Amino acid sequence: MTDEAPVRFELVDINMILQTLPHRFPMLLIDRVINIRTDYSGIGIKNVTFNEPPFQGHFPDRPVYPGVMMIEAMAQTAGVIGIKSVEGTEKPRAVYFLTIDKCKFRKPVLPGDTIEYHMRSIGRRKAMWWFHGDAKVNGQVVAEADVGAMLTD
């Protein structure tokens, strides 16, 4: 059994996310981030609803939340964790995706599901961060990936 690192931020709500990330509708893909820990881990939350733009074409008769949007949401969650965790970090001018590795989609996500993006840091070099993410619905992994991003000021 492993000991979890102490929680640094219990909740980053949508208002704080808007102050932290440059993303806006329709590309802001997380609703809140919870339990940001001192080991640079945390959980992003997305409530999937049928009235979102992707469901107009993916797929109208059988709505499935796009996997690529889950990967982007993993990166956004990682961005919030990285920015909020480092003392003195101001809002970056941009957050750029660097890498996506070991990506797997395991199960479809449907309207009404709540996705939890469990992210943990696997490396950092200056303004570049790498995280492993597991997207979960009701405790089951629906997608996973290693993502890298660069924060610019």
Image (spheres, rainbow, N blue to C red):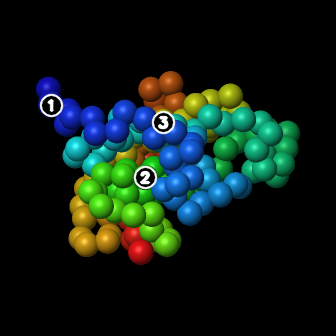
The mark nearer the N terminus, 3 or 1, is 1
Residue under label 2, please give it: 80
- Give the crowd class for mark 1: few <14, some 14-19, many >=20 residues within 10 Å: few
**Label number found at residue 2:** 1
CA separation in Å, label 3 and label 1: 21 Å
Horizontal and vertical percent position of residue 121: 28, 53
Horizontal and vertical percent position of residue 78: 40, 53
Looking at the image, residue 107 lies above or below residue 76: above
Q: Residue at x 41, y 75 (%)?
A: 153
Q: Secondary structure at mark 1?
A: loop
CA separation in Å, label 2 and label 3: 14 Å
Q: Quadrant of residue 82?
A: bottom left
Residue 1 visible here? yes
CA separation in Å, label 1 and label 2: 24 Å
Q: Secondary structure at mark 2?
A: helix
Q: Residue at x 45, y 68 (%)?
A: 92
Horizontal and vertical percent position of residue 147: 40, 60
